[in-house]
Each structure stands twice: as C-alpha cells, then as structure tokens.
Image: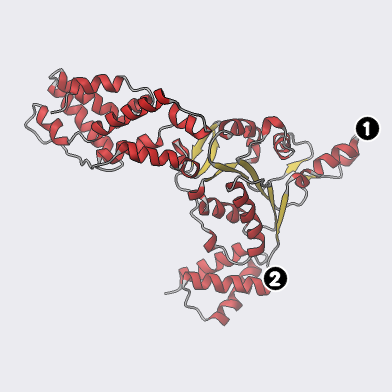
Amino acid sequence: MTDFKRILKQIRSLVIFKELRRDDVLTDMIQTILAICEEDTENAVEWYCDMCGDLYKSGDDLTEYIMKIILEDENLFILKKGEGIETGTMLDNCLANELAFLEELATIPSSEFISRINYDGFLPEYKISPRDFSQIYAQRVHEIKKIGYGIYSKYNIFIIKDGVMTPVEHADPIRLSQLHDYENERSQVIANTKALLAGKPANNVLLYGDCGTGKSSTVKAIANEYACEGLRLIELKKKQLHEIPNIVEKISKNPLKFIIFIDDLSFTEDDNDYAALKAILEGSVASTASNLVIYATSNRRHLVRETFTARKGDEIHFKDTMQELLSLSDRFGLTVTFQKPDKNLFLDLVNKLADEYEVKTDRAELEVKAEAFALSKGGRSPRVAKQFIEYVKGTEE
C-alpha cells in the first residue's frame, strides 16, 4: 500500500518539476490523496472523479499522461541542457530522484484510490503501464537538438499572439511531395534550410513572384518536412515585425533551428515597420542568432511601394533615403523567383494533380477545361491548377 502522507511531502519538495503541481490532473490527485488522508470521503470522491475526468480528456492511461507532461515541461534542467551548460552532480541527482518519484506516482493503480475511499457507489478507473522514466527522459535529453523541449517539442508551427509565442494546433499539413514542378526554385530554399539544420551559414531568403505560384506553400512544406530534424517555424504578420528582437532573445539559446516566416511582405515609403527587419537582415549584434533565418514572400521585387508623390518631398538627401528603402530586398542573401507557368507547365501541373487526386475525366478534355478555368480566374498558376482539379474532383460522380 502506498504511503500517501509521504507522497504529499514529496510532491511539495519537487524542485526541477515543481511546475507540474499546477497541472489539472496532478492537482486533482494531490487533493484526492489529501482528502483520503483526512478521511474526508465526500471531497475524496469529488476530487478523484475530477482527476479521472481531466485525465480522460487526453486518454485513460495515467502513466502515459504524466510521462507526456514531464517531457513537455520547460524546467531549469532541460534549459541548461538546451544551452549546452553543464548541469552538475547535484542537479543530476535531483533529477534522478524526482523522476523515480514521478514514476511511482504515475503507477498508482486506480484500484488503490477506490479501495481507500469509503464509498459504495461507482468510481471510474484508469490504466497504468510500465515505463522507465529515467531512460525515456535521458533519451529526450540526448535528442534535444531535434526534439526540443517545452511547447517546441509538441508543435512545429507558431504565431505571436498578444506578444506570446503561441503554437498552431491545426497547422497546414502540406508536404513537399504535394508540390509539383518548380523543383529548381524549391531546391534552392531546401538547400539553404539544410545548411541551417547542419549548423552551417544560411541565408535569409526572399521568395519573390506572382500570386499563387507556391511561395508560401514551399515554406510551410519545408517546415513540415524537416520538423523531425529540429526545424520550427514562427509566422509573423508585417505589423508584428517589432517583435523580432524579442523573438531572437527568446530562442537564441534554444537547441532547435527556427524560420521566421513573413508572408506577403511589402512597405509604404513612410512605413517604419521595416526597421526591425532591416536590422536583422544587416546582422546587427542585437538582432541576430545562429539558429534563425528569415524567409519572406512578396509579389513585389522592390518591397517598398514608391510613389511619384514621394519623389516631390523636400528632404535634402532624398535620393539616399529612397535608395535605402528600395534596396531592402537586396539585403536578403538569397532571392528565389517564382514565375507564372506557361501553358505547357500549367497543363503539366494539372495532369500531375489529376493523378494525385485520382480524377477520372479524360485528360484531353481536362486540359481544355483547365485552360478555360484559368482564363476565368485571370491567368495560370499552381493555385488555379489546384482549384480546378479540386472542382473537377468534387463534381465527378
């Protein structure tokens, strides 16, 4: 029989995993044990049922649940390991003892709780399973450069919401195998990304070209493709560029590699938002990190919209100012151009997508309809090809 009074003391003495006490399931468990020790049947029943209810939200195995929150915990030990800092014997011993205790906690069977609650009614049950917490955690530490820690170990796509790094739970799952043609353009971005992952010098990339040519899809597919190798993507809106210094500070010591992705980038001539982007592109000390690159897409070769009105200003060194604005795109180390497909490339895309979607329509007929569809959409593009194939597939019997 488990010594519940000892369990309560050990839970309170957690150092590395102290934040786990805030978890709903563990909070319910602590309260259940406390009520049992105080022989408070009414509260014991309520807290135990709350514990099972919170557990059921993600599964019915208590051991797996506790192991999961341990692996996702962003604690002082894993942060040191992530930065490559020596943890020391004392911290290592603390980790070993806490993992052994949490393993014990995670394998308390539901039958023990039920037998110690003086209640004749129905009480729910849960499963436990044998797991070596120390071995599993050691493996996670060993693979930290690919798996990461905290929220970065669970998700690979993030946005900034109210100044906070927020995971995208249902991100676009697109993969490189779903993108057709434009192999040369994509290969340049892939090669640059592989250099980043290998710890080699990597360029900031501007993906420039016509609408619907697959610029954004390329970046998202690369993020998904190499997530298992330690790549994460942070998507920023243009109005959030001022967040870049904060992001750099937050992730510069993280063992993972990051892409800051800015979609559809452009500025007006009086727009000051480009200052933060310019700083990191120029590599100022306060704004760079070796584990980070900027990938931006734009439909404009010159990222700043220049107007004739702006040319009539009264600034003495007006030409220098305009040149600075217009040369922003040149500060990207690599520019990859995605052009609209000609007729042959467009029809090749249509046929490849038709095979992928298992479209039954005769190919000759399909090509004629595809050209008409593109005309109605204002021109050919990979996006239009996909829209057409999805339309055809949806109308086939």
Check the picture and name the quadrant holding the C terminus: bottom left
Q: What residue does disc 1 label?
A: 316
Q: Where is residue 203 in the image (x, y as percent from the top left)?
A: 68, 47
Q: Depth check: 388 or 325 in front?
A: 325
Q: Depth check: 82 or 210 in front?
A: 82
Give the residue at the far front of this rendering.
89
Q: Depth check: 200 or 116 in front?
A: 200
The residue sitting at 33% across, 25% down in the picture is: 21
Q: Where is residue 315 in the image (x, y as percent from the top left)?
A: 90, 32
Location of residue 210 with respect to 106 vertically, above or below: below
Q: Name the amino acid type tagged 2.
A: Asp
Tell me, for residue 67, which label it has, or none: none
Q: For mark 2, give the secondary structure.
A: loop
Q: Name the amino acid type tagged 1.
A: Ile
Q: In this view, does 244 lie to the left or right of 8?
A: right
Q: For mark 1, give the secondary structure.
A: loop
Q: In this view, does 276 lie to the left or right of 37?
A: right
Q: What residue does disc 2 label?
A: 342
The residue sitting at 45% across, 73% down in the picture is: 396
Q: Can residue 183 be seen here? A: yes
Q: In this view, does 310 lie to the left or right of 248?
A: right
Check the picture and name the quadrant holding the N terminus: top left
- Which of the 4 image quarters holds residue 245? top right
Q: Where is residue 364 in the image (x, y as percent from the top left)?
A: 57, 82
Question: Mark 1 packing: few (<14 Cα in 10 Å), some, or many (20+)?
Answer: few
Instruction: Give the mark nearest the N terminus, 1 or 2.
Output: 1
Label 1, label 2: how many angstroms apart (C-alpha)?
46 Å
